[in-house]
Image: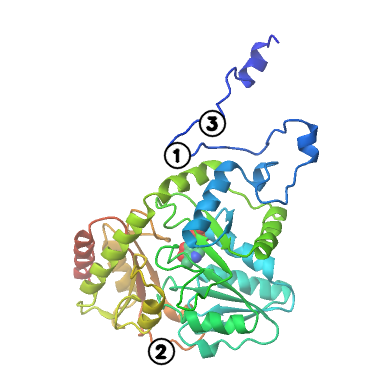
Amino acid sequence: MKLTPQTALIHAPRKAPQFINTVQAPLFRASTIIFENTDALFNRHWTDDYDYSYGTHGTPTTFTLGDHIAQIEGGKYCLLAPSGLSAINLVNSCFLSHGDEVWVADNIYGPNMEHLRNLETRYGIDVKVYNPIDADSFQPSEKAKLLWLEAAGSVTLEFPDLINLVKKAKSKNILTALDNTWGAGLAFNAFDFSDEHLSVDVSVHALTKYPSGGGDILMGSVVTRDKALHHKLFRTHAIQGISISGDDAAQVQRSLASMQIRYQHQSNSALHVLQWLKTQEAFAQVLHPADPDNISHQYWKDTCQTEQSAGLVSVIFKPEYDMNAIRKFCDHLKLFKLGFSWGGPVSLVMLYKLDDMRHLDHSHLQKGILVRFCIGLEDADDLIADIQQALKAL
Ligand SMILES: Cc1ncc(COP(=O)(O)O)c(C=O)c1O
């Protein structure tokens, strides 16, 4: 058929071959997916896992990444979302209904708490807070449906008593969801983390952090091992139109190859920086679960048998340093950039007023302003020198 120039611009003469082997998987970008014929159209199963009928339901690029994330985390099924918070939202909106009770750790990622508070006000869901290092503070009622865990909490870095909390939830048929961003599927296996092979039901991961590794992509995942749970999530994912771009999926997929090396490097650097921070007069407390002085150290040790940790380390300044002083400190840092997030190449710093963030007694934490360091891929001694020069500015 002879084409006019306008039509020829749209229909290229050559199609990419179907089977060509490359190091990186081919990238599919799609909103529309073209059906071979009407049989294919009418036989589509868009509620199936690997149905190719429209971009929001997935493409080979997004399914490749999802399968890979599920495998890394020790799960079987994965759904991808446009951010970590959106993945959290997917879990909450899938499993919580009017009248249900949900339990969250006092050190949970703040926007998750905020999202749940919003559900509480608007949809009558009861939000209860427990102390992650005291499993007895988790006292679910008959209405309890979901227990949120985070290991470790990403600001104060207490590692929860995962084993006893999960055991208790399981004994009462309460679903367990872990924000697995800190462990990234590398520090421990969320689906098999004890000698008794305990497992959470759902693992949520802000792929924005380690899997992306670049500080430039937002994405989240929800991994399960149970088909029925996955299908419930799958249905909610589909009807809410949650989807990600093929380009972003391909970028994250490409970064996975180096994730363990980056995680290990940041884990080692954080420990090196931690040892130095502990010698400094300005700090009332240094927080990291791998530190034997940390209140949650034993829980970290029981769970993270790889002895790896994310590259986060927090300090609480002595009370004589007020907000103005801490701001001066942060403003004087040169290598550490002031910004949210972690897991990227550039070290980051953020400051927090603890009393505004906690609901329960937190007397294991000293009084003072908390500064969190997110260790990047720079040399750890250069990072120490940077903190040292900023401390001198005080
Ligand atoms: C522990 C934790 N979970 C979830 C998220 C949310 O991820 P995102 O930034 O992709 O929404 C973050 C982001 O900082 C986080 O620190």
What percent of the width, then of the height, locates residue 215? Answer: 41, 52
**Which image quarter: residue 102?**
bottom right
Residue type indicated by callout 3: Phe
Quadrant that contains the N terminus:
top right
Residue type indicated by callout 2: Ser
Distance CA(mark 1)–CA(mark 3): 13 Å
User: Mark 1 — residue?
Assistant: 24
Q: Secondary structure at mark 3?
A: loop
Residue type indicated by callout 1: Gln
Quadrant that contains the C terminus:
bottom left
Closer to us: mark 1 or mark 3? 3
Closer to us: mark 2 or mark 1? 1
User: Mark 3 — residue?
Assistant: 19
10 Å neighbourhood of mark 2: few (<14), some, or many (≥20)? few
For this view, does 188 lie left or right of residue 44? left
* Residue 382, above or below 19: below
The residue at the point 70 percent across, 78 percent down is: 100
Depth order, front residue of 227/273:
227
Q: Secondary structure at mark 2?
A: loop
* Residue 160, above or below 243: below
Distance CA(mark 2)–CA(mark 3): 61 Å
The residue at the point 27 percent across, 69 percent down is: 271
First in sequence: mark 2 or mark 3? 3
What percent of the width, then of the height, locates residue 244? Answer: 58, 48
